Image (tube, rainbow, N blue to C red):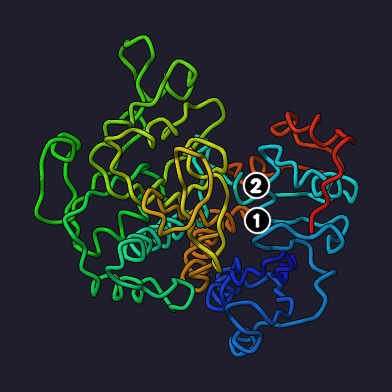
Amino acid sequence: MKFGIIKERKNPPDRRVVFTPMELVRLKTEHPGVQIKVESSDIRVFSDQQYKDFGIEVVDDVADCDVLFGVKEVPITALIPNKKYFFFSHTIKKQLHNQQLLKAVLDKKIDLYDHETIVDANNKRLIGFGRYAGIVGAYNGIRAFGIKFELFNLPKANTLESKSDLISKLRRSVLPPIKIVVTGHGKVGNGAKEILDAMKIKQVTIENFLSKTYAEPVYVQLDVLDYNKRKDGKPSDKNDFYNNPTNYTSNFERFTKVSDIFMAGHFYANDAPEILSRQMLMANDCKIKVVADISCDVNGPIACTIKATTIAEPLFGYLPIENKEVDVFHPAAIVVMSIDNLPCELPKDASEGFGEMFMEHVVPAFFNGDRDGILQRAKITENGKLTKRFEYLQDYADDNKLKNVLI
C-alpha cells in the first residue's frame, strides 16, 4: 500500500498537514510494509528538507500512490481519478460552493473520505482541528477585547510559534474584572477553556456567574441545555433537544445581561434555534462587547456573525441597531472575530495534534480489515456513486442549475 501526502493548493494557502515527519516515521515503524511519499510543497509548515531528514521520500508527483491525504479541499483540476482521498470536502451539508467538487469526485470515480465523517459507532467524531480552533479563537477573543478598549495590544496568533507562546503573551496582559461566557463542551469549547485556565481565569457556576459580582475576571462554560429551553416549558434532555430542536428556543439572554465576552464554541445543527439574536444585542441591558465566534456559522445562530473574517483582517465592528458592519472603535459597536480557519494560525501544533489522532483512530483500519467500520462510515463516494450513508446528497450532486466552481 502506498500513502501519499499531497500539497495544499487551496487559496488562501493552508500550511497544515495530516502527518508530520515524526508521525510518518512512526507509521513506517508500526507498519513496515507501507510506502510513503510526500508531495513537494513550499508552503507547508514542515519543509521538504525536514521530511527528507527523517528518511521520507519527497517527490513532485504522487500519482502512483493508492491513498492520498490532504487537509483542505482539492481543486478539481488537481484531482487524480480512481484514487482514495482524505480531506475536508465541505460537501456533507450541501455547501453550494463545493457542489462542483462533489460532482468531479463522482465523475473521476474517486473514493472520498471526509475527515469530518470519521466517526465511531456512536457517530462521535474521532479527529479534527477543533481543539486548536478553540485555543486560537479564545486568544483572539482576549486580543479583541484589549484592542477595543485600548488595554493591551497582543500580536496576531499567526506570528507566534505555539500554544505556549500564546499563553505567555496572554499572561502578561492584565484583564479587568470581566465575565466571559463559553458555549460548548466539545473539542472547540474545551480548547477555549484550555486558554482561560492557562490564564488562571476563575471558572464559576452558572448561578454565581449570573448573580455575583467579582473583583477578578471569571468565566462559565455552558452546555446546550444551559442556553436552550423547551417552548412549552416541559422538562428537557439532550436527546430530546437533538431529536426535536424546533421545540426549543434560546434563553441565552440571561447571559447577555452580565457577560462582557462571548466565546462561541458550540456545535450548531440544522433547525436548532438561534442562540444570540439581534434583539438580544439591541437590548439596553446587553453587556456583550466582544463576540469570538469560533464556530463561525455565517448568518446562523449568532446574529452578529454576518461574515467570516480572515487571519489578515480578523475583526470587525457590528452595529446591532442597523445590523451592519462598522468600525471596531464605533462607540456602539460589538467587536466580532469570526475567522473560519482558526487552526491555520497554529499550523505546527495543529498538525501534530491531528496526526496523533489520525494515527490512533484511522491508520489501524487500513491494516485490520476495518474491523471497527471506521473507513466504511467515513466513505462518501465509491466507484462513481454515493455510498448508502450519504445518499441524501444525491439531489445536491444532481443539481445542474448551480455552477459554483471550486477555486
Residue drawn at point x = 64 percent, y = 40 percent: 377
Residue drawn at point x = 20 percent, y = 36 percent: 206
Left or right, 179 with reference to 100: left
Q: Position of residue 15 (x, y in %)?
A: 61, 72
Report the quarter where the C terminus lies.
bottom right
Q: Could you say which disc has been placed on residue 366 in the image?
A: 1
Q: Could you say which disc has been placed on residue 375 in the image?
A: 2
Q: Measured along the vertical axis of the image, is residue 41 above or below residue 100?
A: below
Left or right, 173 with reference to 121: left
Q: Tell me how far mark 2 sits from mark 1, CA to CA.
A: 8 Å
In the rendered structure, which amino acid carries the disc numbered 2? Answer: Leu
Q: Position of residue 175 (x, y in %)?
A: 21, 63
For the residues labelled 2 and 1, say whether their Cβ atoms are less than 8 Å apart.
Answer: yes
CA neighbours of label 2 inside 10 A, class few (<14), some (14 to 19), many (20+) = many
Q: Could you say which disc has been placed on residue 115 in the image?
A: none
Mark 2 falls on what kind of element? helix
In the rendered structure, which amino acid carries the disc numbered 1? Answer: Phe
Identify which residue, 237 or 359, lies in the foreground. Answer: 237
Q: Quadrant of residue 72?
A: bottom right
Q: Quadrant of residue 134?
A: bottom left
Label 2 or label 1, whichever comes before in sequence order? 1
Left or right, 330 with reference to 174: right
Residue drawn at point x = 37 percent, y = 42 percent: 184
Q: Position of residue 215 (x, y in %)?
A: 9, 54
Identify which residue, 170 or 268, lies in the foreground. Answer: 170
Report the quarter where the N terminus lies.
bottom right
Mark 1 falls on what kind of element? helix
